[in-house]
Amino acid sequence: MDVSHLLDGLNDDQRQAVGSPLGAALILAGAGSGKTRVLVHRIAWLVQVEGASPNTILAVTFTNKAAAEMRGRIETLLGHSMSMWVGTFHGLAHRLLRLHWREAGLSQNFQILDSEDQARLMRKVLKSLELDETRWVPREIQWFINAQKDEGLRPKHLKADDPTRLQLIKIYQAYEDACKRAGVVDFAELLLRAYEIWRDNPGLLEHYRNRFAHVLVDEFQDTNTIQYKWLTLLSTPNGLPFVVGDDDQSIYRWRGAKVENLQQFRRDFPKAILYKLEQNYRSTGIILQAANALIAHNEGRLGKTLWTSGAPGERIKLYAAFNERDEADFVVNRIRDWVAHGGARREAAVLYRSNAQSRVFEEAFLNARMPYRVYGGLRFFERAEIKDALAYLRIISSRNDDTSFERVVNFPTRGIGAKTLDMLRDYARTHAASLWSAAEACIKSGLTQRAAQALQSFLQLIEKLAAEIKDLELYEAVDHVIQMCGLIESFKKEKGERGEARVENLLELVSAARGFTPEQNWADNAGLPTDANSPEDATRATDVVANRAISVPLAPLESFLAHAVLESGEGQADPYADCVQMMTLHSAKGLEFPVVFLAGMEEGLFPHQRSAADLAGLEEERRLCYVGTTRAMRQLYITYAEQRRLYGVDNYAQPSRFIGEFPVDVLEEIRPRLQISRPLFAKISQGGSLRETPAPGMKMGSRVRHAKFGDGVVLNFEGNGPQARIQVNFEGQGTKWLMLSYANLEVV
DNA sequence: AAGTTCCGAGTTTTT
DNA sequence: CTCGGAACTT
């Protein structure tokens, strides 16, 4: 077979990687170096050159978008992607758990919690433990538990060194019990359990090791501990993992990602061949020069220098705005120019560190009548009314789902108040039962007639709906439920456009159900040769495994529900409209734009105060800046505001140290403040102050003396005139905000 | 059970 | 400042 097209149009490094001999390989792929291309071509290579059967291939990504793109490109190249497992970690883990729910100790119709559901359940658990929510903050505990699961740790693995930790472990255990009772798993649990069933069932593991000879992983630097363990469990000792990543683009440490996994991989697979993709096809020479210089400030990199055969292009424009509104106006005007010169709005992107910054830009775009799109809002399946409707469907599908029960038992209101619910919760807790069965029991005794009747009507409603939709098509079932459960009437009563929009969204849910074809979800992938259907697998698989696999087919409703949680849908606005793009730096990863604005480049904001405390945090911020820089294809603007109103108060910050880490000659100041290329410029990266402050003689970093608190260092100012306040870090006393006019500070 | 006010927190985000 | 949740009224 002629396979030359598989290598056509690839550069030497890419070819080497694509045609790498069978065995472990690590591809260090810089930004814009064509990593997805390599991954996709490698898969085609495995099939067409190495003769690998497509169903021995497992390709793993982090986002649904990446998975869909990869699948699409494989299909373009091979004509099909059938029988390959291509998906996200979570999607694949889910698929395994559906196949092997018994080994996983789950109920067959287990449901998945998204983070909001998880937070609700957490609050419920804390309440049932009668813990003070101000001391045991639900969000923090949720974070703690997820972090443990990301590390592969169950409550029993944790050591209680002190009372606080002991309590945390107890809560973790209680939360697990609650999940089990309700038949639900959270996102982290999907991964952990998928790992555990392999770890604890040698036969099962053996089956999958035989089945997936070829494991390919995208964005490897983002894997957390449990994902890494899951992958290596599968790949050891005969697997041929082919992993692609970039240590310089690791920006998810805060949610458990371990860049070290790249290094660990080299230790665990010493024979792995290392390839580096350093030729960049995206940005101009100057942008790459800037990015290279910036990231060189990080320590312990694997090392990589981007280069291009293209032109150097224009210098990076640096704009010192007077304040955040001036910054936004500047961006608007520059995009106007871009459009006036024939550019499209969608080619311009405004990137910022935190979502709060988007507001001012939105106002400016609105003012200028310039269409824009903000990424990262609420997704379709996360909207309240959609979750309400899904909760009805979920409780129909699984009566024990307490989270859904609580959500809709009295919504729309049907006279079931707090007292009744308290009783149910109490009964459920003491009898280790679900709220549904508690309701059944309490109706018989223990409730007032009126409450019992109200509750009864709810139970009957659910049973009735369940019976009625039994033989309906999925979309008819969804339609029937939203019509009959009372949500629509309730939203219609809501005043204003809000209610209307909600009704529309509910109807949209029906169309989503109608458009939900088997191709979109894993249950159909199960329609591809399942383990038991495929003769070669059946002979290898243990009987246990093969028999289980037959029991896969998941009812359409259940698979739709899983789809809704795992793939929460696009945000608003249609992606084809010609809109200016606005998003956080995090969500910009993987994208590219001809014109990029990196806004809010100020100390405290970027690098963010809360991340800059330790070196690891600061380096991650720097990688984030690197990611932002490398999004730009032709033009890059960097802006900062000398004064910024944040949370209602004025703040004065220094320009970000990252500005000072770019080479002097790649920058061009539009409103000269920093006097780039003069010695003064060097001060930026050392934290020197270059602007006036409300306190004459004092500036950022000055040493000051206070009569009571002693000596300290000036950290920040806010406000003007008599309202001006100053933030000082006093030695041994910590950081304090003082009214400048009363503090009587003395410069030391 | 619905409507009010008050308080506190406010990086980053996928699944 | 601005949102969301909790605690308070009505």
Image (spheres, coloured by chain):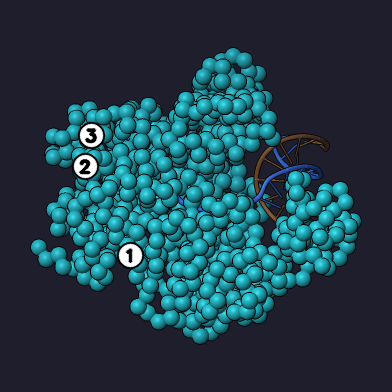
Chain colours: A cyan, B blue, C brown
Query: Are the residues under badges 2 and 3 in a single subunit?
Result: yes
Q: Is residue A381 left or right of residue A490?
A: left
Q: Farthest residue toward the front?
A: A748
Q: Residue at x 30, y 38 (%)?
A: A233
Q: Farthest residue toward the bottom?
A: A341
Q: Is residue A10 left or right of residue A515?
A: left
Q: Which residue is mark 1?
A: A277
Q: Which residue is mark 3?
A: A206
Q: Tell me where residue A449 appears, x and y as whole percent.
A: 64, 19
Q: Is residue A652 left or right of residue A537?
A: right
Is residue A286 visible in this depiction of the protein? yes
Query: Dot 1: few (<14), some (14–19), or many (≥20) neighbours within 10 Å?
Result: many
Q: Residue at x 45, y 81 (%)?
A: A313
In the rendered image, which quarter is residue A337 located in? bottom right
Task: Kindly identify which chain the residue marked by label 2 belongs to.
Answer: A
Q: Which residue is mark 2?
A: A238
Q: Tell me where residue A677 appears, x and y as whole percent.
A: 59, 79
Task: Kindly identify which chain the residue marked by label 3 belongs to.
Answer: A
Q: CA distance from mark 2 to mark 3?
A: 11 Å
Q: CA distance from mark 1 to mark 3?
A: 34 Å
Secondary structure under the numbered disc 2 in the rendered image: loop
Query: Tag 2: residue type?
Result: Asn
Secondary structure under the numbered disc 3 in the rendered image: helix
Query: Dot 3: few (<14), some (14–19), or many (≥20) neighbours within 10 Å?
Result: some
Q: CA distance from mark 2 to mark 1?
A: 26 Å
